[in-house]
Image (tube, rainbow, N blue to C red):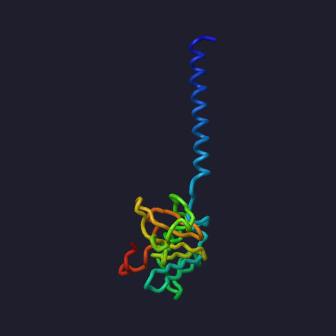
Amino acid sequence: MRRKARQRWIVVGIALALLALAAAQYLHDQRQAPGTLLAMDPEAVTSVELALPGQPPERYRRHDGHWWQADGKRADDGRLEELAGIAQAPVASWRPASDFDAAKIGLAPPVVQLRLDGEVLDFGTTAVTGPLRYVRVGKRIALVPLRYTPRPATRNAERIH
Protein backbone atom coordinates (compact mmCIF):
# COMPACT_ATOMS: atom_id res chain seq x y z
CA MET A 1 0.00 0.00 0.00
CA ARG A 2 1.34 3.39 -0.87
CA ARG A 3 2.07 5.97 1.77
CA LYS A 4 -0.73 8.42 0.73
CA ALA A 5 -3.38 5.70 0.70
CA ARG A 6 -2.29 4.51 4.14
CA GLN A 7 -2.45 8.09 5.50
CA ARG A 8 -5.98 8.50 4.09
CA TRP A 9 -7.12 5.30 5.80
CA ILE A 10 -5.61 6.48 9.08
CA VAL A 11 -7.39 9.85 8.80
CA VAL A 12 -10.70 8.13 7.93
CA GLY A 13 -10.25 5.78 10.90
CA ILE A 14 -9.58 8.68 13.28
CA ALA A 15 -12.59 10.58 11.91
CA LEU A 16 -14.85 7.54 12.40
CA ALA A 17 -13.55 7.02 15.93
CA LEU A 18 -14.24 10.70 16.79
CA LEU A 19 -17.71 10.44 15.28
CA ALA A 20 -18.45 7.32 17.37
CA LEU A 21 -17.22 9.06 20.53
CA ALA A 22 -19.38 12.11 19.80
CA ALA A 23 -22.45 9.92 19.24
CA ALA A 24 -21.82 8.03 22.48
CA GLN A 25 -21.47 11.32 24.39
CA TYR A 26 -24.68 12.66 22.85
CA LEU A 27 -26.63 9.54 23.86
CA HIS A 28 -25.19 9.68 27.37
CA ASP A 29 -26.16 13.36 27.71
CA GLN A 30 -29.71 12.59 26.50
CA ARG A 31 -30.10 9.85 29.12
CA GLN A 32 -28.84 12.18 31.87
CA ALA A 33 -30.97 15.20 30.84
CA PRO A 34 -33.32 16.39 33.60
CA GLY A 35 -36.28 16.54 31.21
CA THR A 36 -39.41 18.64 31.70
CA LEU A 37 -41.64 19.51 34.66
CA LEU A 38 -44.41 17.07 33.74
CA ALA A 39 -44.66 14.13 31.38
CA MET A 40 -47.77 15.66 29.88
CA ASP A 41 -48.60 16.95 26.41
CA PRO A 42 -49.76 20.58 26.72
CA GLU A 43 -52.23 19.99 23.87
CA ALA A 44 -53.93 17.29 25.97
CA VAL A 45 -54.47 19.52 29.03
CA THR A 46 -58.19 20.14 29.60
CA SER A 47 -58.28 21.95 32.94
CA VAL A 48 -56.14 24.70 34.40
CA GLU A 49 -56.34 26.25 37.85
CA LEU A 50 -54.13 29.15 38.90
CA ALA A 51 -53.98 30.23 42.55
CA LEU A 52 -52.20 33.36 43.70
CA PRO A 53 -52.13 34.36 47.38
CA GLY A 54 -54.82 36.88 48.26
CA GLN A 55 -56.77 36.36 45.03
CA PRO A 56 -59.58 33.99 44.11
CA PRO A 57 -58.40 30.99 42.10
CA GLU A 58 -58.75 31.20 38.33
CA ARG A 59 -60.35 28.05 36.88
CA TYR A 60 -60.51 27.18 33.21
CA ARG A 61 -61.67 24.27 31.06
CA ARG A 62 -60.94 23.49 27.44
CA HIS A 63 -63.77 22.36 25.24
CA ASP A 64 -64.73 22.87 21.62
CA GLY A 65 -61.11 23.84 20.93
CA HIS A 66 -61.22 26.92 23.19
CA TRP A 67 -60.60 27.80 26.81
CA TRP A 68 -63.50 28.86 29.01
CA GLN A 69 -63.67 30.38 32.48
CA ALA A 70 -65.62 28.57 35.20
CA ASP A 71 -68.43 31.13 34.81
CA GLY A 72 -68.87 30.21 31.12
CA LYS A 73 -67.08 33.21 29.59
CA ARG A 74 -64.42 32.74 26.92
CA ALA A 75 -60.85 32.98 28.18
CA ASP A 76 -57.71 34.17 26.43
CA ASP A 77 -56.71 31.05 24.46
CA GLY A 78 -53.12 32.27 24.03
CA ARG A 79 -52.61 32.82 27.75
CA LEU A 80 -54.11 29.43 28.61
CA GLU A 81 -51.96 27.68 25.99
CA GLU A 82 -49.00 29.39 27.64
CA LEU A 83 -50.07 28.08 31.06
CA ALA A 84 -50.61 24.55 29.71
CA GLY A 85 -47.19 24.77 28.02
CA ILE A 86 -45.54 25.13 31.43
CA ALA A 87 -45.92 21.34 31.71
CA GLN A 88 -43.08 21.05 29.19
CA ALA A 89 -40.83 23.66 30.81
CA PRO A 90 -37.20 22.48 30.58
CA VAL A 91 -35.72 21.61 33.95
CA ALA A 92 -32.18 22.74 34.73
CA SER A 93 -31.91 20.31 37.66
CA TRP A 94 -33.98 18.18 40.05
CA ARG A 95 -33.41 17.67 43.77
CA PRO A 96 -35.41 16.00 46.53
CA ALA A 97 -37.72 18.42 48.39
CA SER A 98 -36.10 17.26 51.63
CA ASP A 99 -32.89 19.06 50.55
CA PHE A 100 -34.60 22.43 51.04
CA ASP A 101 -36.33 24.51 53.70
CA ALA A 102 -39.59 25.24 51.85
CA ALA A 103 -40.00 28.64 53.55
CA LYS A 104 -36.56 29.80 52.41
CA ILE A 105 -37.29 29.11 48.75
CA GLY A 106 -40.81 30.58 48.78
CA LEU A 107 -42.75 27.33 48.88
CA ALA A 108 -44.36 27.70 52.32
CA PRO A 109 -46.75 28.97 51.07
CA PRO A 110 -46.00 28.93 47.33
CA VAL A 111 -45.76 32.22 45.44
CA VAL A 112 -48.17 30.75 42.88
CA GLN A 113 -49.77 27.34 42.40
CA LEU A 114 -50.70 25.92 39.01
CA ARG A 115 -52.81 22.79 38.51
CA LEU A 116 -52.81 21.16 35.10
CA ASP A 117 -55.33 18.32 34.92
CA GLY A 118 -54.85 17.80 38.66
CA GLU A 119 -51.02 17.83 38.58
CA VAL A 120 -49.83 20.46 41.08
CA LEU A 121 -46.91 22.79 40.39
CA ASP A 122 -45.92 25.03 43.32
CA PHE A 123 -43.75 27.98 42.29
CA GLY A 124 -41.32 29.51 44.76
CA THR A 125 -38.81 32.33 44.66
CA THR A 126 -36.07 32.91 42.14
CA ALA A 127 -32.75 31.17 42.66
CA VAL A 128 -29.68 33.18 43.58
CA THR A 129 -27.65 31.21 41.03
CA GLY A 130 -29.32 32.64 37.94
CA PRO A 131 -32.61 33.43 36.20
CA LEU A 132 -34.28 30.29 37.52
CA ARG A 133 -37.29 29.64 39.78
CA TYR A 134 -37.87 26.85 42.30
CA VAL A 135 -40.85 24.63 41.41
CA ARG A 136 -42.12 21.81 43.61
CA VAL A 137 -43.55 18.82 41.74
CA GLY A 138 -44.59 16.13 44.19
CA LYS A 139 -41.61 15.35 46.40
CA ARG A 140 -39.03 16.93 44.10
CA ILE A 141 -37.87 20.48 43.47
CA ALA A 142 -36.96 21.64 39.98
CA LEU A 143 -35.16 24.74 38.80
CA VAL A 144 -36.79 26.13 35.66
CA PRO A 145 -36.22 29.32 33.64
CA LEU A 146 -38.13 32.35 34.93
CA ARG A 147 -40.06 32.73 31.68
CA TYR A 148 -42.14 29.69 32.68
CA THR A 149 -43.62 31.46 35.71
CA PRO A 150 -47.43 31.65 35.42
CA ARG A 151 -48.77 35.16 35.08
CA PRO A 152 -52.06 36.42 36.51
CA ALA A 153 -54.98 37.25 34.21
CA THR A 154 -55.24 40.94 35.03
CA ARG A 155 -52.67 43.66 34.61
CA ASN A 156 -53.52 45.07 38.02
CA ALA A 157 -52.68 41.84 39.82
CA GLU A 158 -49.67 41.85 42.10
CA ARG A 159 -46.36 40.95 40.42
CA ILE A 160 -44.83 37.57 41.19
CA HIS A 161 -41.36 37.95 42.68
Asked if 32 appears above or below 101 in the picture, the reply is above
The residue furthest right is: 1
Residue at 49% x, 77% y: name it.
Answer: 108
Quadrant in the picture for residue 140: bottom right
Q: State the image coordinates of residue 154 (x, y, percent, origin top left).
A: 40, 80
Quarter of the picture containing the C terminus is: bottom left
Q: Give coordinates of residue 49: x percent, y percent.
A: 53, 79
Residue situated in front as seen by the camera: 109 or 8: 109
Q: Residue at x 47, y 74 (%)?
A: 103
- The correct choice, above or below, for 80 with respect to 127 in the image is below
- Work out whether residue 78 or residue 14 is closer to the camera in this orientation and state it: 14
**Could you say where residue 15 lies in the image, as x and y percent from the top left?**
57, 29
* Image-based side of 16 in relation to 135, left or right: right
Q: Is residue 90 above or below residue 118?
A: above
Residue 1 in the image, given as x and y percentages of width and height: 64, 11
Residue 131 in the image: above or below residue 29: below
Q: Residue furthest left?
A: 156
Of the pair 49 and 66, the residue shown nearer to us: 49
